[in-house]
Image (cartoon, rainbow, N blue to C red):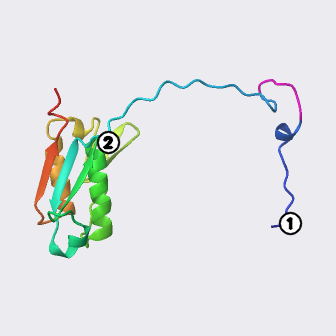
Amino acid sequence: MSNREWVVHPNRSELGPDEPGCNGHFRSVSRPPRRKVSTENKCLARVELPESLSELADEDGSRTFGGYDWLFVVGAAHTFARIHTDVEVPLPFGFKDCGVWWWWDGTTTEESILDGPDAVGYVEEFLERLFPGMPITVTDGRTAET
């Protein structure tokens, strides 16, 4: 333990009335009920791994990345490729900053490219950069909902 003197802010140590800004005053805040989030993987990307990565593969020799949306899938695949392959991985797929989406290829958009009809194509293109020469199958289960 150090021999520094610890000083407590006076507002935190003095007894006083239960008023705003004084010690002891609090209020409970009711929270809205939690949304039930589906845990079902609706977006799937299956990559057939080479023999050198067989210890990381499923029984059929592939690795499946799944999630509720494409950002989760490409994020998991990006992390896997960065840790387990020698491929020079591209920048992370995309992120939103100050209302603008920034994508791995240097482009920017006002709306997410994953909300459009070409989302699967963008995901496939990104995965081909992560896993060059490996067969990739992408399935979008969100469009099959009725």
Residue that mark 2 sits on: 101
Element carrying mark 2: strand
Q: Is residue 18 magenta?
A: yes
Placement of 143 over or under 9, stated as above or below:
above
User: Residue at 83% of width from left, 37% of height from top?
Assistant: 11
Q: Is 70 on the left or on the right of 146, as rendered?
A: right
- The amino acid type, in three-letter code, at marker 2 is Trp
User: Which of the numbered marks, if any, corresponds to residue 3?
Assistant: 1
The answer to which quarter of the image holds residue 100 is top left
**Percent coordinates x, y for residue 137 in the rendering:** 12, 53
Nearest to the observer: residue 111 or residue 53:
53
Residue 112: percent from left, percent from top = 27, 38
Question: Is residue 103 among the parts visible in the rendering?
Answer: no
The tag earlier along the polypeptide, 2 or 1, is 1
Where does the N terminus fall, quadrant-wise? bottom right
Q: Quadrant of residue 87?
A: bottom left
Q: Is residue 22 visible?
A: yes
Look at the numbered disc 1 and give the secondary structure of its residue: loop
- Looking at the rendering, the stretch of residues picked out in magenta corresponds to 15-20
Residue 16 - label: none
Q: Is residue 90 magenta?
A: no
Which residue is more in the foreground, 62 or 109? 62
